[in-house]
Amino acid sequence: MYPLIDWLLALPTVFLALIVAAFWGGVAYAVHRVAVPRICGPDGRRLGKFEAEVTSQIALSFGLLISFNAVWIWDRGDRVRGAVLDEASALQSVLDVAQASEVLVDVAAIPDRVQKYARHLIDVEWPTLSDAKASRTRPTEFTALRREVAQWPDAELLAAVDRAGDARDLRLREGLVYMSPLRWIVVVMLGVLLLLSIGALHGEAPRGRILALSLVSVAIATCFLVLVAHGRPFVGSFAIKPTELERVVERIESERAARR
C-alpha cells in the first residue's frame, strides 16, 4: 500500500489533481446515477422530505476532520523544515567555531569532515527519504566528524556537532511518518456520506442534484489535493530539498579555493 501511495505522491501536481478529481467525480456520478435513485426512488420521493440539517451536520464533521488532519500535516511539515534548517545551521556553527578557535592544529581537518558528512546527506541519504524505510542509523561520516571534533578541547564545537545529529534525528523521525490509514479512511467515508446526503437532499430535482454534487465534489477534491500533496515532506512536487546543506558545502569549497 505504501509504495503505491509514494508513487502517486511523486507524480506532478497536475496529474495528482486529475486523479483526485476523477476519484471524487466518479463518486459523485455514482451517487447521482445509482445511489440516489435506489434510495429515493426514480422520482426522488420515496424518502419524503430530507432535512438540510442532516447535510449541515455531516459537512461540519467533514470540515472539522479535514482541518484536524491538515493541521497535523502542516505542523509536521514545519517541524521537518525547521529540523533541516537547524541541521545546516549547526554545521555552519561547527565551521564558525573551528575558524575562530585558537587551539586547532589542523584547521582544515574539521571542514573536510563537515564537507564529507554534508555530501553524504545530499548525495546518498536524501534520495532515499522518499522511502519510509530509509535508514535512520547515523552514518559513518557523522561518527568520523564527531570523533575528529572530540579531539579538541572545545565544548562549543562538540555541542554544535551534537545539535546537527539531533536535528537529523528529528528530520527523519518526523519526515518518514505516514498519516494513519485510518484517518484517510474516515475522511473518505465522511466525504462519501456528504455527497450521499446532498444527493438525497436534491432527490426530486435531478438538474439541481447534478449542480450540487458537482460543486461539492470539486470542493472535496480540492481539500484532498491539499492533504495529499503535502502528505510526505520528502516526496512530490513540494518535497523539501537539501538547499541549506548545499550552501554549507559551497561555503567550504569557496573558503578552500580562497586559501589556495
Image (cartoon, helix red, strand yellow):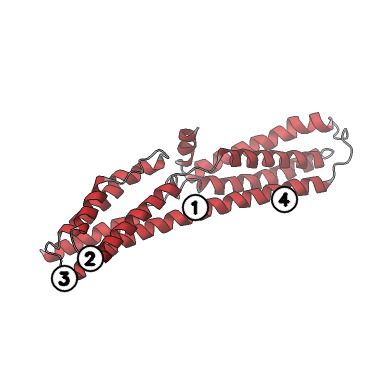
Chain-order first, disc 3 or disc 1: 1
Q: Secondary structure at mark 4?
A: helix
Residue at which label 4 appears: 60
Mark 1 surroundings within 10 Å by alpha-carbon count, few (fewer than 14), some (14 through 19), many (20 or more): many
Mark 2 surroundings within 10 Å by alpha-carbon count, few (fewer than 14), some (14 through 19), many (20 or more): some
Kindly report which numbered mark, 2 or 4, lies closer to the viewer in this rendering.
Answer: 2
| Kind of residue at disc 4 | Leu
Kindly report which numbered mark, 1 or 4, lies closer to the viewer in this rendering.
Answer: 1
Q: Are marks 1 and 2 in contact (CB under 8 Å)?
A: no
Mark 3 surroundings within 10 Å by alpha-carbon count, few (fewer than 14), some (14 through 19), many (20 or more): few
Residue at which label 3 appears: 102
| Distance from the alpha carbon under mark 3 to that under mark 2 | 10 Å
Residue under the image location 74 percent in, 29 percent down:
34
Chain-order first, disc 3 or disc 4: 4
| Kind of residue at disc 1 | Arg
| Distance from the alpha carbon under mark 3 to that under mark 1 | 41 Å
Q: Is residue 129 above or below residue 72?
A: above
Residue at which label 2 appears: 154
- In the image shown, does 114 or 215 lie closer to the viewer? 114
The x, y position of residue 224, in whole percent, is 59, 45
| Kind of residue at disc 2 | Asp
- In the image shown, does 211 or 28 lie closer to the viewer? 28
Mark 4 surroundings within 10 Å by alpha-carbon count, few (fewer than 14), some (14 through 19), many (20 or more): few
| Kind of residue at disc 3 | Glu
Q: Are marks 3 and 1 in contact (CB under 8 Å)?
A: no
